[in-house]
Image (cartoon, rainbow, N blue to C red):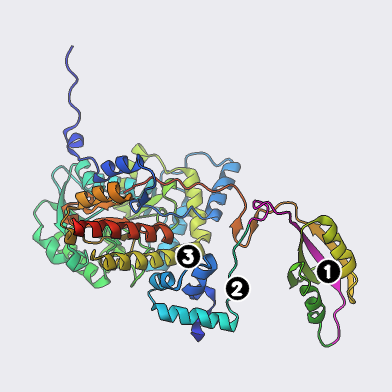
Amino acid sequence: MMPLKPISKIASAIPVSGIRRFFDIAASMQDVISLGVGEPDFVTPWSIREAAIYSLERGHTSYTSNWGLIELRRAISEHLEQLYQVSYRPEDQVLITVGVSEGLDIALRTILDAGDEVLVPEPCYVSYKPCISLAGGVPVAVETTAEEGFRITAQKLEAHLTSRTKAILLGYPSNPTGATMPRALMEDIVRFAERNGLYILSDEIYDRLTYEGEHTCVPSIEGAFERTILFNGFSKAYAMTGWRIGYICAPSELLATMMKIHSYTMLCAPITGQKAALEALKSSEPQVQDMIEQYSQRRRVIVNGFNQIGLQCHMPAGAFYAFPSIASTGLSSEEFAERLLFEQRVALVPGTAFGAGGAGHIRCSYATSIEKIEAALERIKCFVEQLKVT
Amino acid sequence: MNNELTNGAKHCPILTILSRDGRASAESIAAQTGREVEAVKASIAKYEEDGVIKRYNAVIDWEKAGYDKVTAFIDVKVVPARDVGFDAIAGRIARFPEVRSVWLVSGGSDLRVVVESTNLRQLANFVAEKLSTINGVTGTVTHFQLRRYKEDEVLYLEAEGNERLVITP
């Protein structure tokens, strides 16, 4: 018998997420306070859950159109128009996906041929680079630093431009740094993309969680619309991570190809989640505002806490992550995270899980109660003080 | 300060935080809102002085604590008095220690009164002897509480599980 042939080289070359190992350790321990959770600690607002239950009672259990429910696409279109004065036709410029994750995958597969390069500012969300590789592309990391507030500039992107560069993949407000992009900086990037015929993929899942200044919605910038693929969804703003509902907005010719892939691979997003998402847009703005206010308060507590402990931390303007530097401790970010977990039972994610640019930092989610944040800061303080003694 | 008072709780983070947790310290509130501790203390003192903050109390599940409690919601029809309208009679009712709340309401009755007692007989006596006999009260309809599901924003239902994983991307 012949030995089994090897699996895909591309798939096997993709590294396991840096988060995985910490998850396995932390999950086996008791009394752990976790600052490692990348999702809201709020339960989905009741009116949304209630609408989903009602839809099940009514027997809404079928497939929907590949595009998603037209009522939901209309509501999303109105929502974006209202927030950012950007107009997408519900009929052929909005596609409902299974979270931004699916959206990103089908968009990358739509635009990339083997060997095409995608510029990715780092530190960035853990899926960006693997998804590019899986689509046959080559991720090109462009490092951003704490001194620059983890913001990307056109000049930095330009330095990594080659004849194979096809797209820029942006995620602002950023997981893991909490950085946001002022409009002027983003305009420079749009000009850069225009000069070089590049697509812009903009993951704006944290748009509503912007605490300072206004969120810059990329396609609302002049000249950006035709080259931009916008990703968003319901997970963060409406505390709906488990429902898996996201969407892509893009010019119709581009979206038609994404829709083709979506129709073969996913068929449609789950109907119950779509019904729930529709209710979220209709009725949940007060709850969204309330959650934003609470995140913003926690953000001040955690950032001031880190700075007082002596771990330098810039004030993140968005998302729900603090990204302090742990350089002053002399430990690497993995050592810091692992020892903190074993010695003080606080779980967080080392910055290197988000790319080499995250070295010397840790990602701390403040999507957890004030009491837990205060307790975690107390433990981290103990840990850092003990390091100084030894 | 004046703005905070007139704009209501929605726009005053200090009040919102205290309404969720009456024991939140001035230090913690200062850290959450980005204000100075002394400024937070001064604001709270002013709220207390102005009667914006009425009091700080714990929300207690008496049943769970093993105490007997009978609660009744009583709709009261009254004849409003000249000059003082409903206020005089509402005030008379409100001063009884058994009475937890009194509201003037629209609809079929005039006042809605919440009464609490340790047993049914005492409560019945209160309605028959104290409440109904007040001059100007023309009728009462008493509804006894059978079960409490939510009160003062606290759910008395099975806890909702939000079992997040310890670490997620």
Above or below A66: residue B83 = below
| Residue depicted at x 83% and y 69% | B76
Q: Secondary structure at mark 1?
A: strand
- Residue B55's mark? 2
Q: Secondary structure at mark 2?
A: loop
- Between residue A375 and residue A319, name the one nearer to us: A375
Q: Amino acid at mark 1?
A: Val
In this rendering, the label closer to the viewer, 1 or 3:
1
- Between residue B91 and residue A197, name the one nearer to us: B91
Q: Are marks 1 and 2 on the same chain?
A: yes
Spot occupied by residue A266 in the image (x, y as percentages of width and height): 37, 39
Q: Chain of mark 3?
A: A
Q: Amino acid at mark 3?
A: Asp
Q: Are marks 1 and 3 on the same chain?
A: no
Residue under numbered circle 3: A290
Q: Residues within 10 Å of mark 1 (few under 14, many from 20)?
A: many
Residue under numbered circle 1: B76
- Residue A109's mark? none
Kindly indicate the quadrant of the structure image that contains residue A35: bottom left
Residue B76 located left or right of residue B8: right
Dot 1 or dot 2: first in sequence order is 2
Q: Residues within 10 Å of mark 3 (few under 14, many from 20)?
A: few
Q: Can residue A199 be seen from the camera position used here?
A: no
Tell me which segment is drawn in magenta: B61-82
Q: Amino acid at mark 2?
A: Arg
- Between residue A294 and residue A259, name the one nearer to us: A294
Spot occupied by residue B61 in the image (x, y as percentages of width and height): 64, 55
Q: Are marks 3 and 2 on the same chain?
A: no
| Marks 3,2: beta carbons within 8 A | no
Q: CA distance from mark 1 to mark 3?
A: 37 Å
Spot occupied by residue A104 in the image (x, y as percentages of width and height): 29, 49
